[in-house]
Amino acid sequence: MEQKVIEQGVTINKESVGGELLRRFKYNRSAVFGLIIILFMVFCAITADFIAPNDPYPSPPLLANKLKPGFWSEKGAEGMPLGSDGLGRCVLSRIIYGARVSLTAGFVAVGIAMVLGITFGVLSGYFGGWVDAVIMRIVDIMFAFPALLLAIVIVTVVGQGLEKAMIAIGIVYSPQMARIIRSSVLYIKEMEYIEVQKAIGSSHWWIIRRHVLPNSIAPVIVYGTLMLASAILDCAALGFLGLGAQPPIPEWGAMLSDSYSFIVSGAWWAATFPGIAILLSVLGLNLLGDGLRDILDPRLKQ
Protein backbone atom coordinates (compact mmCIF):
# COMPACT_ATOMS: atom_id res chain seq x y z
CA MET A 1 0.00 0.00 0.00
CA GLU A 2 1.35 3.39 -0.93
CA GLN A 3 2.39 5.46 2.04
CA LYS A 4 0.71 8.86 2.28
CA VAL A 5 1.03 11.79 4.65
CA ILE A 6 -1.42 14.65 5.15
CA GLU A 7 0.11 17.99 6.05
CA GLN A 8 -1.06 21.54 5.41
CA GLY A 9 -4.29 20.05 4.09
CA VAL A 10 -2.54 18.41 1.13
CA THR A 11 -2.21 14.69 0.51
CA ILE A 12 1.32 13.83 -0.57
CA ASN A 13 2.25 10.53 -2.10
CA LYS A 14 5.78 9.85 -0.86
CA GLU A 15 6.51 7.18 -3.45
CA SER A 16 5.51 9.44 -6.33
CA VAL A 17 7.61 12.30 -4.93
CA GLY A 18 10.62 10.01 -4.56
CA GLY A 19 10.16 8.66 -8.06
CA GLU A 20 9.90 12.15 -9.49
CA LEU A 21 13.12 13.25 -7.76
CA LEU A 22 14.93 10.12 -8.97
CA ARG A 23 13.73 10.72 -12.54
CA ARG A 24 14.90 14.33 -12.47
CA PHE A 25 18.24 13.21 -11.03
CA LYS A 26 18.80 10.70 -13.86
CA TYR A 27 18.24 13.40 -16.47
CA ASN A 28 20.53 15.92 -14.75
CA ARG A 29 23.88 15.19 -16.38
CA SER A 30 25.98 17.36 -14.08
CA ALA A 31 24.57 15.68 -10.97
CA VAL A 32 25.14 12.18 -12.41
CA PHE A 33 28.69 13.00 -13.52
CA GLY A 34 29.50 14.57 -10.15
CA LEU A 35 28.08 11.54 -8.33
CA ILE A 36 30.22 9.19 -10.43
CA ILE A 37 33.37 11.14 -9.54
CA ILE A 38 32.53 11.17 -5.84
CA LEU A 39 31.62 7.48 -5.78
CA PHE A 40 34.96 6.71 -7.43
CA MET A 41 36.77 8.77 -4.77
CA VAL A 42 34.84 7.04 -1.99
CA PHE A 43 35.61 3.64 -3.52
CA CYS A 44 39.33 4.47 -3.55
CA ALA A 45 39.15 5.63 0.08
CA ILE A 46 37.35 2.49 1.27
CA THR A 47 39.46 -0.02 -0.68
CA ALA A 48 42.82 1.74 -0.35
CA ASP A 49 44.29 -1.22 1.55
CA PHE A 50 43.56 -3.50 -1.40
CA ILE A 51 44.04 -1.39 -4.54
CA ALA A 52 47.10 0.68 -3.60
CA PRO A 53 50.14 -0.85 -5.35
CA ASN A 54 52.60 0.05 -2.57
CA ASP A 55 52.87 0.96 1.09
CA PRO A 56 52.31 4.72 1.54
CA TYR A 57 54.59 4.66 4.62
CA PRO A 58 57.68 2.67 3.57
CA SER A 59 60.18 2.33 6.36
CA PRO A 60 62.97 3.04 5.76
CA PRO A 61 62.28 5.40 2.81
CA LEU A 62 63.26 4.00 -0.58
CA LEU A 63 65.70 6.79 -1.45
CA ALA A 64 67.00 4.79 -4.41
CA ASN A 65 63.66 5.51 -6.11
CA LYS A 66 63.70 9.23 -5.29
CA LEU A 67 61.82 11.37 -7.86
CA LYS A 68 61.64 8.69 -10.51
CA PRO A 69 59.00 9.14 -13.26
CA GLY A 70 56.10 6.81 -13.88
CA PHE A 71 54.74 4.74 -16.75
CA TRP A 72 55.44 7.44 -19.37
CA SER A 73 59.22 7.01 -19.07
CA GLU A 74 61.54 4.10 -19.70
CA LYS A 75 63.44 5.11 -16.56
CA GLY A 76 60.31 4.95 -14.43
CA ALA A 77 60.20 3.32 -11.02
CA GLU A 78 59.03 -0.28 -11.17
CA GLY A 79 55.60 -0.79 -9.61
CA MET A 80 54.95 2.95 -9.29
CA PRO A 81 52.68 3.97 -12.21
CA LEU A 82 52.65 7.68 -11.30
CA GLY A 83 56.26 7.89 -10.22
CA SER A 84 57.78 8.55 -6.80
CA ASP A 85 58.15 11.57 -4.53
CA GLY A 86 61.16 13.12 -2.81
CA LEU A 87 61.47 10.20 -0.38
CA GLY A 88 60.98 7.46 -2.97
CA ARG A 89 57.35 6.78 -1.98
CA CYS A 90 54.74 5.75 -4.54
CA VAL A 91 52.73 8.81 -5.58
CA LEU A 92 49.71 6.74 -6.68
CA SER A 93 49.53 4.87 -3.38
CA ARG A 94 49.72 8.06 -1.38
CA ILE A 95 47.01 9.68 -3.51
CA ILE A 96 44.72 6.68 -2.96
CA TYR A 97 45.29 6.73 0.80
CA GLY A 98 45.02 10.51 0.66
CA ALA A 99 41.46 10.15 -0.61
CA ARG A 100 40.60 8.52 2.70
CA VAL A 101 42.23 11.32 4.69
CA SER A 102 40.92 14.26 2.63
CA LEU A 103 37.34 12.99 2.28
CA THR A 104 37.17 12.15 5.97
CA ALA A 105 38.47 15.60 6.88
CA GLY A 106 35.89 17.24 4.62
CA PHE A 107 32.97 15.19 5.93
CA VAL A 108 33.92 15.73 9.57
CA ALA A 109 34.37 19.49 9.06
CA VAL A 110 31.00 19.80 7.30
CA GLY A 111 29.38 17.62 9.96
CA ILE A 112 30.62 19.98 12.67
CA ALA A 113 29.42 22.98 10.67
CA MET A 114 25.99 21.41 10.15
CA VAL A 115 25.51 20.54 13.81
CA LEU A 116 26.51 24.02 14.98
CA GLY A 117 24.82 25.87 12.11
CA ILE A 118 21.52 23.99 12.29
CA THR A 119 21.35 24.31 16.08
CA PHE A 120 21.95 28.05 16.21
CA GLY A 121 20.06 28.74 12.97
CA VAL A 122 16.91 27.01 14.25
CA LEU A 123 17.13 28.74 17.64
CA SER A 124 17.64 32.10 15.97
CA GLY A 125 14.88 31.76 13.39
CA TYR A 126 12.25 30.07 15.54
CA PHE A 127 12.50 32.01 18.80
CA GLY A 128 13.55 35.38 17.37
CA GLY A 129 13.85 38.37 19.72
CA TRP A 130 17.03 38.72 21.73
CA VAL A 131 18.07 35.13 20.87
CA ASP A 132 18.06 36.00 17.17
CA ALA A 133 19.85 39.31 17.79
CA VAL A 134 22.69 37.76 19.81
CA ILE A 135 23.28 34.81 17.48
CA MET A 136 23.14 36.89 14.30
CA ARG A 137 25.57 39.49 15.68
CA ILE A 138 28.06 36.71 16.42
CA VAL A 139 27.51 35.38 12.89
CA ASP A 140 28.08 38.87 11.45
CA ILE A 141 31.36 39.19 13.35
CA MET A 142 32.56 35.83 11.97
CA PHE A 143 31.50 36.84 8.45
CA ALA A 144 33.77 39.88 8.74
CA PHE A 145 36.83 37.61 8.34
CA PRO A 146 37.73 35.50 5.29
CA ALA A 147 36.98 31.84 6.06
CA LEU A 148 40.49 30.52 5.42
CA LEU A 149 42.12 33.35 7.37
CA LEU A 150 39.86 32.70 10.36
CA ALA A 151 40.63 28.97 10.15
CA ILE A 152 44.36 29.75 10.16
CA VAL A 153 43.91 31.91 13.27
CA ILE A 154 41.98 29.16 15.07
CA VAL A 155 44.53 26.47 14.16
CA THR A 156 47.37 28.75 15.24
CA VAL A 157 45.70 29.21 18.63
CA VAL A 158 44.64 25.60 19.32
CA GLY A 159 47.63 23.94 17.62
CA GLN A 160 48.53 22.20 14.38
CA GLY A 161 47.20 18.87 13.20
CA LEU A 162 44.50 17.36 11.02
CA GLU A 163 41.98 17.08 13.88
CA LYS A 164 42.45 20.74 14.82
CA ALA A 165 42.10 21.75 11.17
CA MET A 166 38.78 19.88 10.85
CA ILE A 167 37.41 21.56 13.97
CA ALA A 168 38.58 24.98 12.80
CA ILE A 169 36.97 24.61 9.36
CA GLY A 170 33.76 23.31 10.94
CA ILE A 171 33.56 26.36 13.21
CA VAL A 172 34.34 28.74 10.35
CA TYR A 173 31.62 27.26 8.10
CA SER A 174 28.92 27.10 10.78
CA PRO A 175 27.77 30.76 10.32
CA GLN A 176 26.98 30.10 6.66
CA MET A 177 24.87 27.09 7.58
CA ALA A 178 23.17 29.07 10.37
CA ARG A 179 22.15 31.76 7.87
CA ILE A 180 20.75 29.19 5.44
CA ILE A 181 18.68 27.32 8.03
CA ARG A 182 17.50 30.54 9.72
CA SER A 183 16.02 31.89 6.49
CA SER A 184 14.07 28.64 5.98
CA VAL A 185 12.84 28.57 9.57
CA LEU A 186 11.64 32.19 9.38
CA TYR A 187 9.38 31.19 6.47
CA ILE A 188 8.20 27.87 7.86
CA LYS A 189 7.27 29.10 11.33
CA GLU A 190 4.69 31.45 9.80
CA MET A 191 2.82 28.61 8.07
CA GLU A 192 -0.70 27.83 9.20
CA TYR A 193 0.03 24.27 10.32
CA ILE A 194 2.67 25.60 12.74
CA GLU A 195 0.08 27.95 14.21
CA VAL A 196 -2.32 25.01 14.56
CA GLN A 197 0.31 23.01 16.44
CA LYS A 198 0.87 25.90 18.82
CA ALA A 199 -2.89 26.31 19.33
CA ILE A 200 -3.37 22.68 20.37
CA GLY A 201 -0.57 22.98 22.91
CA SER A 202 2.37 21.26 21.17
CA SER A 203 5.73 22.12 22.72
CA HIS A 204 8.27 24.22 20.84
CA TRP A 205 10.78 21.37 20.72
CA TRP A 206 8.19 18.94 19.34
CA ILE A 207 7.23 21.43 16.63
CA ILE A 208 10.89 21.99 15.73
CA ARG A 209 11.66 18.28 15.59
CA ARG A 210 8.47 17.20 13.81
CA HIS A 211 7.80 20.08 11.41
CA VAL A 212 10.48 22.77 11.24
CA LEU A 213 13.59 20.63 10.74
CA PRO A 214 12.13 18.18 8.18
CA ASN A 215 10.82 21.04 6.05
CA SER A 216 14.13 22.94 6.24
CA ILE A 217 16.44 20.10 5.29
CA ALA A 218 16.45 20.49 1.47
CA PRO A 219 18.63 23.65 1.33
CA VAL A 220 20.88 22.13 4.00
CA ILE A 221 21.55 19.07 1.81
CA VAL A 222 22.34 21.20 -1.23
CA TYR A 223 24.52 23.70 0.59
CA GLY A 224 26.21 20.96 2.61
CA THR A 225 27.32 19.26 -0.62
CA LEU A 226 28.78 22.51 -1.96
CA MET A 227 30.33 23.23 1.44
CA LEU A 228 32.02 19.82 1.39
CA ALA A 229 33.96 20.82 -1.71
CA SER A 230 35.15 24.02 -0.03
CA ALA A 231 36.03 22.11 3.15
CA ILE A 232 38.25 19.67 1.25
CA LEU A 233 39.91 22.59 -0.50
CA ASP A 234 40.51 24.45 2.77
CA CYS A 235 41.84 21.31 4.47
CA ALA A 236 44.27 20.97 1.58
CA ALA A 237 45.22 24.65 1.94
CA LEU A 238 45.93 24.22 5.66
CA GLY A 239 47.91 21.09 4.90
CA PHE A 240 49.89 22.98 2.25
CA LEU A 241 50.70 25.68 4.82
CA GLY A 242 51.85 23.05 7.32
CA LEU A 243 48.95 23.71 9.71
CA GLY A 244 46.81 20.69 8.83
CA ALA A 245 47.89 17.09 8.33
CA GLN A 246 51.48 16.50 9.42
CA PRO A 247 54.02 14.19 7.73
CA PRO A 248 53.94 11.35 6.94
CA ILE A 249 50.11 11.43 6.65
CA PRO A 250 49.28 11.22 2.90
CA GLU A 251 46.95 14.22 2.71
CA TRP A 252 46.70 15.87 -0.71
CA GLY A 253 47.52 19.40 0.47
CA ALA A 254 50.51 18.20 2.49
CA MET A 255 51.71 16.22 -0.55
CA LEU A 256 51.60 19.41 -2.61
CA SER A 257 53.55 21.25 0.07
CA ASP A 258 56.24 18.56 0.12
CA SER A 259 56.59 18.34 -3.67
CA TYR A 260 55.89 21.69 -5.33
CA SER A 261 59.56 22.68 -5.11
CA PHE A 262 60.49 19.68 -7.29
CA ILE A 263 58.57 21.07 -10.27
CA VAL A 264 61.45 23.35 -11.29
CA SER A 265 63.82 20.38 -11.26
CA GLY A 266 61.62 18.46 -13.70
CA ALA A 267 59.83 16.14 -11.24
CA TRP A 268 56.43 17.61 -12.05
CA TRP A 269 54.48 14.43 -11.27
CA ALA A 270 55.07 14.58 -7.50
CA ALA A 271 52.90 17.70 -7.18
CA THR A 272 50.73 17.52 -10.29
CA PHE A 273 48.83 14.32 -9.51
CA PRO A 274 47.84 15.30 -5.93
CA GLY A 275 46.64 18.61 -7.41
CA ILE A 276 44.55 16.73 -9.98
CA ALA A 277 43.03 14.65 -7.16
CA ILE A 278 41.98 17.84 -5.35
CA LEU A 279 40.61 19.27 -8.61
CA LEU A 280 38.51 16.18 -9.39
CA SER A 281 37.04 15.91 -5.90
CA VAL A 282 36.07 19.59 -5.78
CA LEU A 283 34.70 19.43 -9.34
CA GLY A 284 32.61 16.35 -8.57
CA LEU A 285 31.13 17.84 -5.40
CA ASN A 286 30.33 21.15 -7.10
CA LEU A 287 28.61 19.40 -10.01
CA LEU A 288 26.65 17.21 -7.62
CA GLY A 289 25.66 20.19 -5.47
CA ASP A 290 24.54 22.26 -8.45
CA GLY A 291 22.55 19.31 -9.76
CA LEU A 292 20.85 18.72 -6.41
CA ARG A 293 19.94 22.40 -6.22
CA ASP A 294 18.28 22.18 -9.65
CA ILE A 295 16.46 18.97 -8.71
CA LEU A 296 15.16 20.15 -5.32
CA ASP A 297 14.19 23.66 -6.44
CA PRO A 298 10.47 23.56 -7.34
CA ARG A 299 10.89 26.68 -9.51
CA LEU A 300 13.09 24.63 -11.85
CA LYS A 301 10.75 21.66 -12.09
CA GLN A 302 10.22 22.04 -15.83
Image: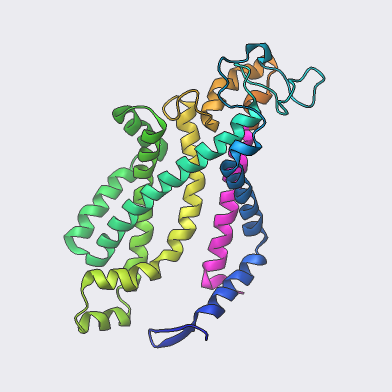
Which secondary structure is most common in the magenta stretch?
helix
Seen at 61% across and 54% down, the residue is 35
Q: What stretch is highlighted in magenta?
A: 274-302
Q: Decide which of 133, 255 is in the foreground and name it.
A: 255
Q: Which residue lies furthest to the right in this view?
A: 74
Q: Where is residue 93 in the image (x, y as percent from the top left)?
A: 63, 31
Q: Position of residue 236 (x, y in %)?
A: 50, 34
- Reply above or below: 219 against 285: below
Q: Position of residue 121 (x, y in %)?
A: 31, 58
Seen at 53% across and 62% down, the residue is 293
Residue 205: tell me if it is visible.
Answer: yes
Seen at 62% across and 53% down, the residue is 34
Q: Position of residue 267 (x, y in %)?
A: 68, 19
Q: Residue furthest left?
A: 130
Seen at 54% across and 78% down, the residue is 15
Q: Image check: 300 left or right of 79?
A: left
Q: How many marks?
A: 0
Q: Decide which of 199, 149 is in the foreground and name it.
A: 199
